[in-house]
């Protein structure tokens, strides 16, 4: 066809910037590790590395689930509460003598149900994601406290509590769980058509709908995946601390959102990856771990985390503007 | 003194326009001398010398990407020039920031309304410059003043209404009134009528003429030739970033302007493929739904059925109903002679219906996603084995459409938002070409699209017809539906009020039927 005359000032292809951001974050993580290794001998000790991987693992899983939701231009504030709630559920089931596999399965199904409820609120009732997940945040804590009567449920199942302390091939089992989540998550988000639909819904749900994308199902799926990841973390947390307690994991939703955003996810939707939030979660875990090793006041850790979010996202914004 | 003048004088005092910054009517008010803009190696505007006279309406025409937007941005201080100079009232000026441009009285009204939808009309008109007493807003006084201005301009708009309750066209009028209040001396309109009805356009034109009488210089950018000839005193043509000429409107004609713009004659644009019509693909009987009532029509293989009417006449609503996006409340749809129900979009797609919707921005594209993803969105199911996408097929399909449609992009990975209107429209069309439908519904396919791309889109219609498809063409641009449709249906107030065979009725008849005068 003709009309080759006009010039289009199109920007350079965006291909690869995702990978670039990933590499920048990886560089930051390695630099942190290097610096901490030089600053304190304890950092590179096998014990501490295992500890770091365990610390980061749970936030990482939450952050991956959260990222699915944020890509649809939504938010899931309930994940911290789900972790606390499901830790109670799994503990209660185990103490009631339900077999281990069934206890875990039922707990995960409760995660599915909570996610489906979020989807229902958003799709059918037309509630903003912020509101419906805020509502479950407070309610779930309440329900968990009602079930336990405000106390904690101790878990006497030794196989269950040993799991979180175990290593496999020299790597903590909790970190293996991250890999177990990350691989299917990567396939889902980056290799399957349902992942593409997630981006399309986050970018323009009406255009997606008119293109034959089942928008409602896509939204349901995102919230179900996020809540199920949270339920899995609830099981892992119960295993790690040996109790079920509804008030655990306070503020973890913000950790998860922060990890996701540090990992390059845009809160406006349609931008995000699986490796980004993973790196984000381990950067946050490293900062906490390093601050502990360096005897930095834990109050300061919170301030540093806040500053870090601003700095990283600001640089990301600059970079985006630069490529535009 | 009119309320408009009162208000605009208030602003002139505040802006402290130097008395030296005035020129008599007809003298140069703004002169571009060798003005140039480069983005890296790309020369978006080659050194251009254009003089704008005080109190003239100066149209600027050119295809998308010809440099019109660059020119606007340079004059309104949004971007900085690479070389050249600008004289304002005979003195060199920087125009380095929007604030500087506004303080000199240079302002622009954009195609897309950039106001606050949740605030009232009055609040929007006074935004950033509210009337106040001791820091407290004088809401009533602003509403009264805004209403006076609107009445004065002949716009029948309530100043107290929330902006989002108005149509896009009315919002555009508010934006113009807002600019007119602010002591403007040089006002740029960027395709202001793209989303306006005829009545709204007429109101806007009255306002523009009135501003000219008050000595304001108007720069009018439009794809619509008839508007240029109706309004402008002079016209400048841009092509490929080059200023190729300026003409007095009385000394040129549409053919010459188009020749300057694209080197092609007008007959070649509305070229219509003659394809014998065959079997009926789809037929509606008494179809009703939100915004349309009792619509009976049919589309045959190889024909274009045009739906003409004003915006809001029910054409797009009918299309959305047929496509399963809106619920149908009564009536029947027959596909290949068999009665069908189309409860959702997926059913429509599976039958073989494609819809290129009215608004590229709101319905057509995922703007902040790559071109390739947009093109493939309806067909990912076909490009996947189970849930997993075959990446090579994905890339091939996107590249094929980019090549077929000559979408001007270095790569399928470029975001759709980086494309011009014409190229964005091609992406929307590309989505549906790869889907391979038998009935194509094109809703306003050429809004904000330049002449060259229009011709390409029309040629594409011909190719679809030859492959046995049928087309429903919805348009508010009469020459387009009139010339292209085998059968033309006129909509008014949600109903089908008249039908004509190709060129069987005059332009005037069709218009009268659409307006209901």
Image: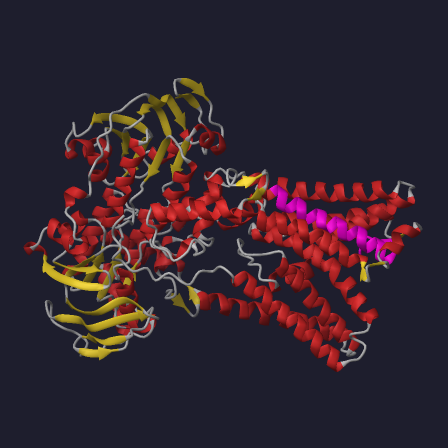
Whether residue A241 appears in magenta in the rendering, the answer is yes
Residue at the image point whose x is 9% and y is 51% from the top: B253
Residue B514 in sight in this render: yes
Judged left or right of residue B464, residue B250 is left
The percent position of residue A189, horizontal first and vertical second, equals 60, 50
The residue nearer to you, when weighing B448 against B349, is B349
Tell me which colouring the rendered structure shows: secondary structure
Residue B165 in sight in this render: no
The residue nearer to you, when weighing B490 against B119, is B490
**The C terminus of chain A is located in which quarter?**
bottom left
* Magenta-drawn stretch, dominant element (helix, strand or loop): helix
Residue most extreme to the left? B251
- Say which quarter of the image contains residue A55: bottom right
Residue most extreme to the bottom? A39
The percent position of residue B371, horizontal first and vertical second, equals 43, 51
Whether residue B275 appears in magenta in the rendering, the answer is no
Q: Is residue B220 above or below residue B377?
A: below
Residue at the image point whose x is 84% and y is 45% from the top: A147
Judged left or right of residue B380, residue B100 is left
The residue nearer to you, when weighing A206 against A7, is A7
- Say which quarter of the image contains residue B141: bottom left
Residue at the image point whose x is 10% and y is 67% from the top: B26
The percent position of residue B346, horizontal first and vertical second, equals 49, 33
The residue nearer to you, when weighing B61 against A164, is A164
Q: Is residue B77 above or below residue B503?
A: below
Q: Which residues are magenta?
A: A220-248
Q: Is residue B375 above or below residue B125?
A: above
The percent position of residue A61, horizontal first and vertical second, equals 71, 55
């Amino acid at each position: 066809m003709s009309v080759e005359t006009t010039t289009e000032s199109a920007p350079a292809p965006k291909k690869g910037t995702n990978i670039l951001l990933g590499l920048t974050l990886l560089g930051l993580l390695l630099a942190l590790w290097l610096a901490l290794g030089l600053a304190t001998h304890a950092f590179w000790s096998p014990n501490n590395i295992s500890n770091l991987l365990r610390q980061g693992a749970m936030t990482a899983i939450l952050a991956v689930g959260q990222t699915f939701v944020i890509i649809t231009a939504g938010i899931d504030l309930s994940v911290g509460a789900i972790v606390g709630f499901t830790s109670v559920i799994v503990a209660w089931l185990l103490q009631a003598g339900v077999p281990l596999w069934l206890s875990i399965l039922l707990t995960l199904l409760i995660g599915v149900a909570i996610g489906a409820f979020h989807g229902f609120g958003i799709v059918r009732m037309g509630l903003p994601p912020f509101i419906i997940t805020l509502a479950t945040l407070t309610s779930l804590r309440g329900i968990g406290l009602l079930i336990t009567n405000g106390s904690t449920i101790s878990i006497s199942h030794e196989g269950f509590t040993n799991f979180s302390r175990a290593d496999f091939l020299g790597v903590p089992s909790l970190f293996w769980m991250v890999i177990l989540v990350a691989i299917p998550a990567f396939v889902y988000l980056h290799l399957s058509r349902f992942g593409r639909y997630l981006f399309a819904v986050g970018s323009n749900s009406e255009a997606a709908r008119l293109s034959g994308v089942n928008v409602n199902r896509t939204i349901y799926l995102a919230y179900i995946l996020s809540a199920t990841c949270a339920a899995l973390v609830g099981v892992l947390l119960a295993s790690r601390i040996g109790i079920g307690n509804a008030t655990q994991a306070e503020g973890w939703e913000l950790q998860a959102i922060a990890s996701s955003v540090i990992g390059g996810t845009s809160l406006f939707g349609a931008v995000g990856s699986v490796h980004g939030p993973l790196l984000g979660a381990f950067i946050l875990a490293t900062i906490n771990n390093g601050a502990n090793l360096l005897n930095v006041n834990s109050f300061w850790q919170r301030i540093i985390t806040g500053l870090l979010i601003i700095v990283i996202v600001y640089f990301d914004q600059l970079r985006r503007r630069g490529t535009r | 003194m009119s309320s408009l003048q009162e208000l605009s004088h208030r602003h002139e005092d505040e802006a402290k326009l130097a008395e030296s910054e005035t020129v008599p009517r007809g003298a140069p008010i703004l002169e571009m001398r060798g003005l140039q803009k480069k983005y890296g190696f790309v020369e978006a505007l080659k050194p251009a010398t254009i003089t704008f006279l005080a109190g003239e309406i100066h149209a600027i025409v050119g295809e998308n990407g010809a440099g019109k937007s660059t020119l606007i941005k340079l004059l309104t201080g949004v971007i900085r020039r690479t070389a050249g100079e600008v004289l304002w009232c005979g003195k060199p000026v920087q125009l380095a920031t929007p604030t500087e441009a506004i303080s000199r009285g240079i302002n622009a009204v954009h195609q897309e309304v950039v106001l606050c939808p949740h605030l009232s009309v009055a609040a929007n008109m006074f935004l950033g410059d509210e009337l106040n007493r001791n820091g407290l807003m004088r809401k009533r006084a602003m509403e009264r003043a805004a209403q006076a201005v609107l009445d004065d301009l002949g716009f029948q708009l309530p100043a107290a209404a929330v902006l989002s309750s108005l149509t896009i066209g009315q919002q555009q009028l508010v934006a113009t009134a807002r600019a007119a209040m602010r002591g403007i001396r040089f006002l740029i309109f960027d395709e202001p009528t793209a989303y306006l009805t005829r009545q709204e356009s007429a109101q806007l034109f009255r306002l523009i003429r009135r501003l000219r009488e008050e000595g304001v210089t108007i720069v009018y950018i439009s794809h619509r030739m008839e508007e240029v000839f109706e309004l402008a005193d002079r016209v400048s043509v841009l092509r490929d970033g080059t200023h190729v000429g300026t003409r007095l409107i009385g000394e040129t004609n549409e053919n010459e302007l188009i020749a300057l713009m694209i080197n092609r004659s007008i007959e070649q644009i509305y070229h219509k493929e003659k394809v014998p019509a065959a079997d009926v693909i789809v037929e509606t009987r008494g179809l009703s739904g939100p915004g349309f009532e009792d619509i009976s029509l049919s589309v045959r293989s190889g024909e274009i059925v045009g739906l003409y009417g004003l915006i809001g006449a029910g054409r797009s609503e009918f299309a959305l109903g047929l496509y399963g996006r809106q619920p149908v409340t009564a009536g029947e749809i027959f596909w290949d002679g068999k009665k069908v129900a189309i409860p959702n979009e997926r059913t429509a797609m599976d039958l073989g219906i494609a819809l290129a919707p009215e608004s590229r921005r709101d319905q057509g594209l995922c703007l902040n996603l790559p071109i390739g993803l947009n093109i493939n969105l309806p067909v990912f199911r076909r490009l996947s084995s189970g849930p997993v996408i075959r990446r090579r097929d994905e890339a091939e399909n996107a590249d094929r459409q980019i090549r077929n449609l000559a979408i001007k992009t270095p790569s399928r990975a470029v975001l759709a938002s980086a494309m011009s209107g014409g190229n964005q429209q091609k992406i929307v069309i590309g989505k549906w070409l790869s889907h391979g439908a038998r009935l194509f519904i094109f809703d306003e396919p050429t809004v904000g699209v330049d002449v060259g791309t229009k011709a390409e889109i029309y040629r594409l219609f011909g190719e679809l017809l030859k492959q046995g498809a049928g087309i429903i063409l919805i348009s508010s641009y009469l020459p387009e539906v009139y010339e292209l449709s085998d059968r033309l249906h006129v909509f008014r107030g949600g109903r089908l009020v008249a039908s004509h065979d190709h060129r069987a009725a005059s332009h005037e008849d069709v218009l009268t039927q659409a307006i209901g005068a």
